[in-house]
């Protein structure tokens, strides 16, 4: 039976939900990723087995098909590593997750560490507006995502840490929103008007304001 979890794609500042469907069958090993995925996503087929093994979880050679839907949406970048790995662990019954309202995003190192990815602020803003309440992402991206009020942000250091979270061994604590005192609210460190260029970045900050 195929598993299904959710991640997100960014086109400019427009965010779209991507379903990651993973089918696992006990046949000769073959790992396919379909759904208009670029070369950097295809390279996840080499990163994911190493990251899973380094995390102390079994990577069982089999016929694996991961479908990124909708198929007509172009997808790029290594941020699909984490949802592809989690989809595999679900399909092989090594994890049990209720995927409702959860987003997974992040690049995996070969040793299972999560590396930061680009575009987190507009992604966090977009998925929250589309009804998703929780996001699991690299620790380095967590504070950026937490700028979106109401979104529960889980900072993840390693794939093993995420597995332990869903196994109930050690829960990842969601990032606590920092509330400024009235005194500090008017003490601005910088003004966006002073920033030259960076049009997309400034627009993303305005979205979160």
Image (spheres, grey):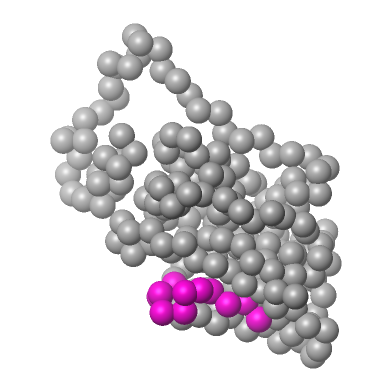
From the viewer's perspective, is 197 left or right of 117?
left
Q: Evaluate whether residue 50 shows in this view.
A: no
Screen quadrant of the C terminus: top left
The residue lying at 18 percent from left, 49 percent from top is: 197
Q: Which residues are magenta?
A: 65-75
The residue lying at 57 percent from left, 33 percent from top is: 175
Residue at the far bottom: name it.
28
Q: In the displayed structure, would residue 19 be above or below residue 130?
A: below
Residue 134, horizontal then vertical, whole percent: 56, 45
Q: Nearer the viewer, residue 92 or 191?
A: 92
The residue lying at 46 percent from left, 62 percent from top is: 17
The residue lying at 51 percent from left, 74 percent from top is: 69
Screen quadrant of the N terminus: bottom right
From the viewer's perspective, is 84 left or right of 91?
left
From the viewer's perspective, is 28 left or right of 40?
right
Residue 22, image quadrant: bottom right
Residue 208, image quadrant: top left
Residue 176, horizontal then vertical, whole percent: 56, 28
Q: Evaluate whether residue 177 shows in this view.
A: yes
Q: In the displayed structure, would residue 1 be above or below residue 126?
A: below
Residue 103 in magenta stretch: no
């Amino acid at each position: 039976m195929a598993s299904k979890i959710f991640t997100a794609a960014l086109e400019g500042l427009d965010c779209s939900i991507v379903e990651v469907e993973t089918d696992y069958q006990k046949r000769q090993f073959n790992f396919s990723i379909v759904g208009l995925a670029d070369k950097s996503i295809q390279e996840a087929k080499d990163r994911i087995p190493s990251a899973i093994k380094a995390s102390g979880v079994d990577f069982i050679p089999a016929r694996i098909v991961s479908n990124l839907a909708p198929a007509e949406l172009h997808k790029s970048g290594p941020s699909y590593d984490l949802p592809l790995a989690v989809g595999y662990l679900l399909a092989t019954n090594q994890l049990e997750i209720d995927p409702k309202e959860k987003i997974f995003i992040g690049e995996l190192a070969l040793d299972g560490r999560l590396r930061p990815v680009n575009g987190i602020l507009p992604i966090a803003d977009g998925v929250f507006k589309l009804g998703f309440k929780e996001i699991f992402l690299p620790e380095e991206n967590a504070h950026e995502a937490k700028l979106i009020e109401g979104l529960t942000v889980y900072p993840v250091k390693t794939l093993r840490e995420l597995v332990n979270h869903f196994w109930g061994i050690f829960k990842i604590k969601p990032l606590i929103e920092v509330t400024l005192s009235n005194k500090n609210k008017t003490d601005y460190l910088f003004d966006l008007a002073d920033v030259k260029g960076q049009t997309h970045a400034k627009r993303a900050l305005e979205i979160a304001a």
